[in-house]
Structures are given as C-alpha cells and as structure tokens.
Amino acid sequence: MKVVVIDDEQNCRIVLRDKLVRLDPTLKVIGEASGVQSGIALIREKRPDLVFLDIQMNDGTGFDLLNMVKDVSFNLIFTTAFDQYAIKAFKFSATDYLLKPIDKKELLESIERIKSKNIKPNHNNGLLSIYESGDFDSIRLRSEDDIKDVQLTDILYIKADGSYCVFHLSTKDKIVVSKPLKEYADLLLETFFMRTHKSFLVNLHSVQSFHYKSLKLILLSGEEISVSRRNKKEVLDQIVKTKRIKLLKNS
C-alpha cells in the first residue's frame, strides 16, 4: 500500500514514518509534505492509496487541502493534536482520526481496518461538496470493531448513553459510537434532524405524530421518544413546517 504523510512538523513525519515501517512492512511511504500546497502537489504526483493528514498546518488546514483536491482516490487518516475536529473529519469521510502522540495500537488497528474491510473512499459523497455546502447524505460511523457508511435517511434517532451515542437504524440495527451526542448535533442539525431532548436527536422524516400534552413523539416504527419542555416549542415549529406529521394537542 502506497502511503503519503502530510504534516508541517518534521519530527511528527519522521516518527510516523518509522512507526509505519515497523508495524507493517507492506506499507511503503512514497512521499512526505509539510503543508497544504506541497501536499496537493504530492498527492497529484504520487497517487497514494493512503494519506495521513495533519489538520493545523502553517499554510492552511487539512480540510483546505481536501477542498482543493478534485479526485479523492485514497483512504484518509487524520492525525492531529486537537480533538475538536473529529466530527468534521468524519464529515470528510475519513477512515480514522488519530490524536498525537499517535498510539501504536490505534495506528495498527486503523491500518488493519482499511486492509481487512477493503475500505474505499466515499466518492458518492464527494469530499469537496460535503464540506463546502453541507450537502451530504451519509455519515461514517466508527464503532468498537467496525466502520460503516450510514445513510442519514436510515437513522431513526440517536440516543445519548453517557459519553457514547447509540444510532438506531431503520433496519433495527444499532451502532454504538464513542462520541457524545453534542458532536453529532453540531453536524446533523444542519439537516433534517431535530433535538427533542438532551438525550435524543430524531430524524424528522421518521416521525408519525407528536403528542403535545404528553410530550411524546411517535415514530413510524412505533417507538416513543421523549420531548423536553425546553425543546417543546422548537419541536412544535418543526412539526408545523412539515405538514405531514400529525399534531395531537389533547393527548
């Protein structure tokens, strides 16, 4: 597998390169770059299978680089010292997001995940349009032992469980992700999801009726979702806008 490392800190590039060589001899680091512009040139010249990309660099961000690369034909792993970019990174269909200093075990797991699952870049989303316009129709979720691209329309609701989130899908499957609900709210509230309660994000298209008096949403699946008094007006406004969901004021 051909690998490129893009990071403005030379020491970080050296350390990562050495770890890759030791962990997996099938990986071949074919180039390094120290910034956005040099990284773009390197990707276009070398056409790597996998790119390790820093986020904060001297001449811009890793997101800037992706916005300027038209043909994304590689797997992507972000490497950064900042954890606040995680959701944005997965919005770019990143395979993984590793915090510096990079843990050897996590690095190996990321590589093995790519190889074993034969993960390919999500061309349908288009990394450029996802970030620039916010027009995206799927999200990449990483559970403890798998990575899945999930269509937003297949998500019925997301429930907070401490520092984790549980994605409830229309297929009746559940995906547990080790991220707090707030991070997904920041991303999904731009779409057709609404915050009904501090513990719930709900797909508006999955709602059948809103029982205003008892503060309950009834989903098409038959499940009930609580609505907090704090979120009642916002939920009501969303319900009225749709003109499809039944509003039951006396129940």
Image (cartoon, rainbow, N blue to C red):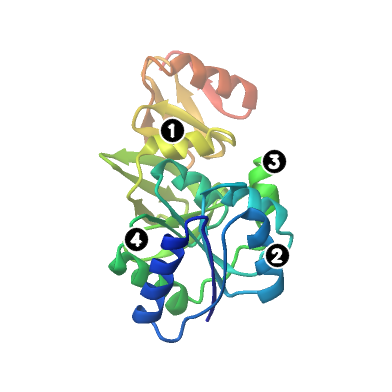
Residue 147: image quadrant is bottom left
Q: CA–CA distance between discs 3 and 2?
A: 25 Å
For badge 2, the amino acid type reads: Ala
Q: Which residue is mark 4?
A: 102
- Given residues 212 and 132, the one toward you in this image is 132
Mark 2 touches mark 4? (CB < 8 Å):
no
Is 130 or 35 nearer to us in this picture?
35
Q: Number of marks in the image?
A: 4
- Residue bearing the label numbered 1: 218
Amino acid identity at mark 3: Ser
Please state if 241 lies on the left or on the right of 118 as rendered. Answer: right
The tag earlier along the polypeptide, 3 or 4, is 4
> Which structural element holds mark 3?
helix
Q: Mark 4: which secondary structure?
A: loop
Q: Residue at x 47, y 51 (%)?
A: 170
Q: Earlier in the sequence, mark 1 or mark 2?
A: 2
Q: Position of residue 173 (x, y in %)?
A: 39, 57
Chain-order first, disc 3 or disc 1: 3
Few, some or many residues within 10 Å of mark 3 (<14, 14–19, 20+): few
1 or 2: mark nearer the eye? 2
Mark 4 / mark 1, whichever is N-terminal = 4
* Image coords of residue 8 (percent x, y): 52, 55
* Mark 3 or mark 1, whichever is nearer to me: 3
The secondary structure type at the circle numbered 2 is: helix
Nearest-to-viewer mark from 3 and 4? 4
Question: Pointer 2: what residue?
Answer: 41
For badge 1, the amino acid type reads Ile
Residue for badge 3: 133
Which amino acid lies under the numbered mark 4 shown in the image of this protein?
Ile
